[in-house]
Amino acid sequence: MGTSFGRGGATTFQQDLQNSDCIVIQGSNMAECHPVGFQWVMEARRRGATVIHVDPRFTRTSAVADLHVPIRAGSDIAFLGALVNHVLSNELDFREYVVNYTNAAAIVDEEFRDTDDLDGLFVGYDPESGQYDPSHWQYAGAPQSAAAGMRDPAQPGGPSRPHEEPGDPEEMSAGARHKAGRSETSGSGGPSVHAKPQRDETLQDPRCVFQILKRHFARYTPEMVQQVCGISPEQFAQVAEALTSNSGRERTSAFVYAVGWTHHSVGVQNIRCAAILQQLLGNIGRPGGGIMALRGHASIQGSTDIPTLFNILPGYLPMAHAHEHLDLDSYVEADAGKTGFWGNMRDYTVSLLKAYWGEAATEQNEFCFDYLPRLTGNHGTYDTVMGQIEGRVKGYFIVGENPAVGSGNGKMQRLGMANLDWLVVRDMAMIESATFWKDSPEIATGELVTADIGTEVFFLPAASHVEKSGSFTNTQRMLQWHHKAVEPPGDCRSELQFYHDLGKIIRRKLAGSNDDMDRPLLDLTWDYPTEGPLAEPNAESVLREINGWSGDGAEGTALSSYTELKSDGSTTCGCWIYCGVYADETNQAARRRPHWEQSYVAPEWGWAWPSNRRILYNRASADPDGKPWSERKRYVWWDAEANDGSGSWTGMDVPDFIADRPPDHVPEEGAQGPDAIGGRDPFIMQTDGKSWLFVPTGLADGPMPTHYEPAESPVRNPLYGRQANPAREKVEHPANPTNPSLSDVFPFVFTSYRLTEHHTAGGMSRTLPYLAELQPEMFCEVSPRLAEMRGLQHGGWATIVTARTAIEARVMVTDRVRSLRVGEQSIEQVGLPYHWGGNGLSTGDSMNDLVNLTLDPNVHIQDKVGTCDINPGRRPRGPKLTAYVEGYRRRAGLDGDLDRQEGSTT
C-alpha cells in the first residue's frame, strides 16, 4: 500500500467498516482471527451491507457472510485482476475520482513493454540475475528513478542467494546490491519520482496508465478465473455486481485482508491488486471504503513503525547503505521525494538523530549521521538463518517469537540455532526455541545430537502485558496505552527493563574507551528515569522521547505534530509519524473517552498516526472542488467561510491535507516539499500527489500485479509462459528443497491458518489448560473426496509430506474444504493450523516444518502455500522419518537440484 498510496498502514479504521455498503474479506478469516474488530463487519451487515468472504475454506467468517467464494490457495491475483478487467471493460470506474486523484492519466515511457508482449515478463528483466531494471517503467520524460524495491539508484532490485557476500561497491553483483532491498521504506512516504508526469486527462493516449492497465488485465476474464481459481463465472458475477454497484459517488466498499495475502511469493502484488480496484472504484479516503490491513496481534503495526525490520529506521526512514550513503546529504538526496511531505525527510532524520545522540549530535558532525550502522545486504530473518548455518552469525536474541515453530521451514531454524555460540530466549514459557537442543524433531531422527550442540542457551523469563506499562499500536495505526496492573513475579522482567539494563551494562564495560567504534554506544542518550521496586524505566518517558520536543534536552516542550520538526537540530523526535502522541505534555494514547460522548470516529480514544487521523487520504472524500461527493458519504470538506473567511478543511476527522490550502491552489513552478502539493492532490506522501495504479518505481517484481503460480503448484500457469514469479527470492540449502510443480508425487495443495483458541506459535496458549482443552490436537481439514481418495478416516491420523519433512495430524473430514475444478483438473487442498509444537499441555507436529522458503522479492516473506501428499496413519519415527521423506524426494526426481526445473514455464 505504500507504493500505491504513500503509506503502508491501513487506510481506514475498523469502526468505519460499519459505514461500508459492501465488504470483501479475502486473505483473512476475520471472525476467528480478529473477533473484536469483526463486530463492525456485523454492524455493517445489519445496516444492509453485502459481506463477501473469498477463502479456500468455509469458516466462521463465511458462515455469517452473504456469499462465500471458495478459491484455490495462491490464485488471488487472477480473481482480483478479473475484477479490475470487469470494471475497466464495462466502464464502471468512478471516472471523476480516477482522473483527478490517481495516476491514470500519466504517460509512461515508450520503452515500456508489458507481460502481454513478453509472455509473463515486464521489460527490463535480466534472466541471469533474475531481477528487473525498473528504469524502463518510468513516466515519459522523467529522469531515471530509484530501483525496484528500494530508493538507491545504484541498487537494482531482484532476488539473490542470501549468503552472497558484497565486495567492492564497483564490483558488487546485482544480487548482492539487492540484499539491501527496502520496499518497507514506503511505509510512510511513497517511492520518489523526480518529475511530475505528463498527463492526458482524456485517458485516450495509448501510453497513459489507464490504457496500459486495460490491456494488461484484458486476459483476466471470468472464464480464466474458473480455470485458475476454480470459481464459477456465476459466482464471479455475483462478486463483481456487489462490489461495483456498491461503489461510486453515493456508496463505498471496503477490502479486508491479513496474512492470507501477505504470505506469498507475490504477496505485495496481491495487495497492489486490491489497491488498484479501490482506486478505480473511488473507495480510498472515504468513509466505508479503504483497505483494512489486519495485523496479527497486539502491536504488529508498532513493530514496523518502531521497527524490528533490518532495513528501516523509526517512521520508515530507510537504513543507510554502506556504499551509497556516505554522508547525510547523499542519504537525503537519494531518498527524499522532491515534492510532498516526504520532501521534509531531512527534518525527520535530524530529529531522530538528536533523539539518539542528544547533545553529541551537532551540525558540525552531521548530527552523528556517521554513527548509524550501514546496510551491506539483505539481513532479513531467513538470511540470518543462513548465516547461523554457515557460521557467520554467532549469537541470537529471540524475544516474543518462537522460530522453531512459528517461522517457515522449522528445520532450518533449528539447524541454525544449533550452530550458534549463544542464544538468548525471553518468553513466559519454555518454548520450543529454548529446548530445541534436547527435544527437536532432529534429535529424534539423529540429524542433531544434543552432546554435539555447542549453543549456550540463556532463558530469561519475561513479564506479561499486565505486568508492565506501555503502548500497543494496533491494526488501524492506533496507539493504546496499557497500565501495569501487578508487579512481574520472580525474575520476570519487561523488555524495556531488559534492554535498558543491557545497554547500561555494555556502556559500563566500554567506559573510558578511546576507540571511535565505541562512540555511538557511549554517546547514546540512555538516561531514562526509573521507578518502582524493580527500578523499571518509566515507559511514559520513552513515549515522550518518541513524540519529541523542541528546545534543549528533556526539559524542552513536547511537540504537537511532525510538521513542527526541523533539520537544524532544534527538535528531537524518536519517530516522526508518532509526533503528537504526547502533545500538550499529555499521554494521548491513554485517552479513553467513551464512544457515547463523541462521534463514531472517536478521536479521543487512543491516538492514531499520523496526527490522530483515522482515515488516511481523506481529502479524497471530497470532490476536486472540495465538496462532499455526496451528503451520505460526507467526511472532510472545504469550508470557504472558516478561518475568518480565508477557508479551511474541516469535517469529522483531522484533515489529511494542508488545512488552509484551497481546492483551486496551483503550486508555483519548481515548488518543492509540501509547497508542491496542489489543492487537488489528496495523496500528500506521493511525489505527484496522486495514488498509483501503475508503480513506476518501488517494487522488485513489476509495476502492475501479474498472476504467477506459487513456487510449488499442481497446475500450469494458463495466463503466461512464466510459471512462478520470475523475481522471487530463493533460499538455496539442502534442507530447503522445492517440490517440483505439476508433480504426481506431490499432487495436493496445503495452506496454513490460525485458530481463535490458540495464539500464534502456541507459547501463550498451548500451556494454558482452558485453551488447550478447546483445541486439544493438531489436525488437518480435508474434503470428503480427498478422504475417499486416500482412505482417510474422520478422527483418525494422517501423514502430510513434502520434500522438507512429514508431519502427522488428526483428520477432520469436512465440506468446509471443497474440491475445486481447475481447468481439466480437480484440485484438493489440505488445511493446516500452525499453532502446534512439542512443548506444553497440547502438543503436536509443527505445520511450518512443511514450508518451503521461496520469498516475496519486496519484503522477503515466505509462501504459505505449497504442494504435498497425504496418507492415512501416523508418520514414521526416528531415522525412519528421514528415509520416508528421502523416498519421496527420489520419486519426485529431486536428485540434488534444489530449484527443480519447471520445463518451458520457467
Image (cartoon, grey):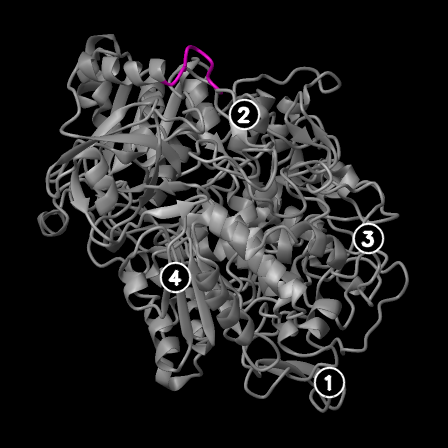
Q: What predominant SS class does the magenta segment belong to?
A: loop
Magenta range? 892-899
Query: Which quarter of the rendering shows the C terminus?
Result: top right
Disc 4 and disc 2: Cα gap in Å? 54 Å
Disc 2 and disc 1: Cα gap in Å? 54 Å
Q: Does 606 sit above or below residue 75?
A: below
Question: Residue 36, image x and y in percent?
Answer: 30, 65
The residue that mark 1 highlights is 647
Which sits in the foreground, 360 or 381? 381
The residue that mark 3 highlights is 207
Which secondary structure, mark 3?
loop
Disc 4 and disc 3: Cα gap in Å? 36 Å
Quarter of the image where one finds residue 374: top right
- The amino acid type of the residue labelled 3 equals Arg
Which one is closest to the eye, mark 4 or mark 1? 4
Residue pictured at 86% horizontal, 57% vertical? 198
Who comes first in sequence, dot 4 or dot 3? 4
- The amino acid type of the residue labelled 2 equals Asp
Quarter of the image where one finds residue 602: bottom left
As drawn, which residue projects farthest toward the right?
A: 669
User: Which numbered dot is residue 53?
Assistant: 4
Residue pictured at 39% horizontal, 39% vertical? 864
Which secondary structure, mark 4?
strand
Does the stretch in magenta take in 893? yes
The residue that mark 2 highlights is 518
- The amino acid type of the residue labelled 1 equals Gly
Who comes first in sequence, dot 3 or dot 2? 3
User: Which numbered dot is residue 747?
Assistant: none
Who comes first in sequence, dot 4 or dot 2? 4
